[in-house]
Image (cartoon, grey):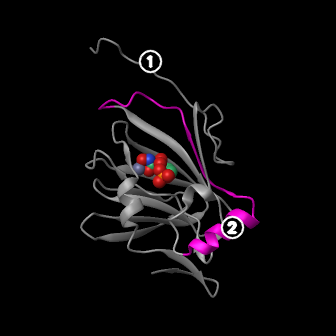
Amino acid sequence: MPTNPMDPFTVLIDLENGTMPDNTNYLKRNASDMRGHYANNEAMENLISDNGDPLHYEVFETPVPEDVGQLMYCLSRLQPGKVGDEFFMTKGHYHTVEATAEIYLCLKGQGYMLMKTADGKCAAEEMSRGRMVYVPPFWAHRSVNTSKDEPLISFCVYPANAGHNYGDIEQEGFPKRIFERDGRVVIE
Ligand code: PAN
Ligand code: ZN
């Protein structure tokens, strides 16, 4: 028996609105937090100045201890929109402990999980209600909302000791981006 066992608990998830009403951790990123991540920097500056620095995405958590054996979980809610013709997306990251996987269960919306490895592999898996994306160990991941008017909502679960490495993605980017061209979703 561990010396300090945790008690079981439940958490309410609002499946309709994609929130965790009793969250104790709330992270919000606006357009200005995403500078440098999109292909068109000028479109990003215009979005910030002309549209009041709109909300990009939110993450709701009720964290558990970041210990080996624990599972961290969160609700991720990514707004629809575009920077130029590139769809809104999350920053994306590797896990600091690289050999840790993650499960994303899409609860609502439409989009893709873009994934890449440090040695150049890239993948895009579709996200839609009820579809689960398995992000294997060593794969950086970023979600992209391709809907015109609906948030992309996912429930994520990953080892609590995984940590987040944003710096490498800020430098490397992803080999592919997702655009709207002539009304179609294009990955290139
Ligand atoms: C998710 C992400 C969440 C926000 O919980 O952290 O979707 O994306 P960024 O972390 O890239 O800003 C996850 O992958 N956790 O490991
Ligand atoms: Zn992750």
Q: Amino acid at mark 2?
A: Leu
- What residue is shown with label 2? 47
Q: Quadrant of residue 64?
A: top left
Question: In this picture, is 114 found above or below 91?
Answer: below
Comes first in the chain, label 2 or label 1:
1
User: Which residue sits furthest top?
Assistant: 3
Q: Which residues are magenta?
A: 40-69
Does 82 appear above or below 94?
below
- Residue at horizontal 31%, vertical 32%? 69
**Residue assigned mark 1:** 7
Percent coordinates x, y for residue 151 in the rendering: 65, 58
Secondary element at tag 2? helix
Judge whether 71 appears above or below 187 on screen.
Answer: above
Residue drawn at x 68%, y 67% as measured from the top left: 47
Residue 147 visible in rendering = no
* Residue count near mark 2 (Cα–Cα under 10 Å), binned few <14, some 14–19, many ≥20: some
Q: Is residue 71 magenta?
A: no
Looking at the image, which is closer to me, 36 or 128?
36
Measuring from the top left, give residue 153's x and y in whole percent.
59, 54
Q: Does residue 44 appear in this view?
A: yes
154 left or right, relative to 160: right
